[in-house]
Image: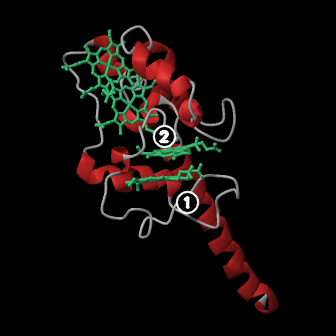
């Protein structure tokens, strides 16, 4: 007996730990955990219940024909309206109520360089500029039209 006493002590600690674990687990485990995978199944309903904040490109057409047309023929055709103007579901529902964001002249350099600042991580063909050297004192919009930027 004396020879295995130290083993018994470890076994008791082990069993006690497992019991504590199982009790705590039973108390804190969300009900829907494990139903469809190793996460809380109700999280999907929670996400679905969030309000939709983006309207989608198609919604802008009827009211902003000029900008849609201008952009469609430019290299910005693949950049969605809302990636520059923000989430606009509220604006589509009530155009006079929720005013979209529009980068002001003072912040335009930072705004455009978010995508166009030179960086080794970008594909070689992506048009980039070194913001400290490319006409540093002027807003990008003075030379490039945001909806059709080619000069
Ligand atoms: C039902 C018509 C309608 C729809 C749909 C609509 N807009 Fe507008 N938008 C307006 C009107 C009207 C104004 C002018 C609001 C004002 O001056 O108070 C405006 C203003 C704007 C402005 C600000 C212009 C400025 O000079 O400040 C931007 C940017 C804009 N819309 C972008 C969008 C985008 C992007 C979409 C698509 C997601 C969109 N709008 C969908 C009617 C619409
Ligand atoms: C690359 C970013 C970018 C994208 C994409 C973009 N816009 Fe703009 N938009 C701007 C900027 C910057 C201005 C402000 C121009 C200025 O004040 O000189 C602007 C201005 C506007 C205005 C105010 C009137 C005008 O022409 O100056 C409207 C309306 C507008 N955008 C609608 C749209 C719609 C609709 C789309 C999608 C078809 C769109 N924009 C896509 C950057 C963008
Ligand atoms: C969300 C990212 C994004 C933002 C913000 C953005 N652009 Fe672009 N821009 C692009 C993409 C994508 C292209 C197309 C690249 C390609 O052809 O591979 C592009 C192309 C261009 C080109 C090349 C035009 C040509 O046809 O050769 C210029 C110049 C340009 N953008 C200027 C601007 C300016 C000025 C602004 C700010 C008003 C701006 N961009 C904001 C993503 C962006
Ligand atoms: C003083 C006018 C001016 C200003 C301000 C300006 N640019 Fe340019 N940009 C040009 C000219 C001119 C070219 C050369 C056009 C060409 O060779 O295709 C050019 C080229 C570019 C190109 C490369 C286009 C390509 O096809 O490779 C990008 C990207 C660009 N500019 C982005 C910007 C951004 C972003 C800003 C603001 C931070 C800005 N520019 C400010 C005049 C300007």
User: Residue at (28%, 29%) from the top-left corner?
Assistant: 100
User: Residue at (45%, 36%) from the top-left corner?
Assistant: 83
Q: Relative to residue 103, is residue 28 drawn left or right? A: right
Report the front residue among 144 and 37. Answer: 144
Disc number placed over residue 92 in the picture, else none: none
Q: Residues within 10 Å of mark 2 (few under 14, many from 20)?
A: some
Q: Quadrant of the N terminus?
A: bottom right
- Secondary structure category for the residue under label 2: loop
User: Residue at (41%, 17%) from the top-left corner?
Assistant: 66
Asked if the residue at label 1 sits under 8 Å from ligand 3, the reply is: no
Residue 95: x and y in percent read 26, 15
Asked if the residue at label 2 sits under 8 Å from ligand 3, the reply is: yes
Q: Residues within 10 Å of mark 1 (few under 14, many from 20)?
A: few
Is residue 84 depicted above or below 4 in this figure? above
Which residue bears the numbered disc 2? 149
Q: Where is residue 34, by image quadrant?
A: top right
Report, in whole angstroms, how far the alpha carbon at label 2 lies from the one at label 1: 64 Å
Q: Where is residue 14, by image quadrant?
A: bottom right
Which residue bears the numbered disc 1? 20
Is residue 72 depicted above or below 105 in this figure? above
User: Are dots 2 and 1 in contact, CB under 8 Å?
Assistant: no
Q: Relative to residue 150, is residue 144 drawn left or right? A: left
């Amino acid at each position: 007996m004396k020879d295995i006493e130290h083993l018994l002590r470890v076994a008791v600690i082990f069993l006690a730990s497992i019991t504590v674990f199982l009790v705590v687990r039973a108390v804190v485990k969300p009900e829907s955990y494990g139903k469809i995978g190793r996460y809380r199944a109700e999280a999907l309903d929670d996400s679905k219940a969030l309000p939709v904040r983006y309207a989608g490109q198609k919604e802008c057409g009827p009211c902003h024909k000029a900008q849609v047309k201008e952009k469609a023929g430019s290299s910005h055709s693949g950049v969605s309206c809302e990636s520059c103007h923000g989430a606009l579901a509220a604006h589509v529902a009530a155009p006079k109520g929720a005013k979209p964001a529009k980068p002001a002249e003072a912040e335009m350099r930072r705004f455009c360089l978010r995508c166009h600042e030179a960086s080794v991580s970008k594909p070689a063909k992506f048009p980039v500029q070194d913001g400290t050297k490319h006409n540093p004192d002027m807003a990008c919009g003075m030379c490039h039209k945001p909806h059709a930027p080619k000069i």
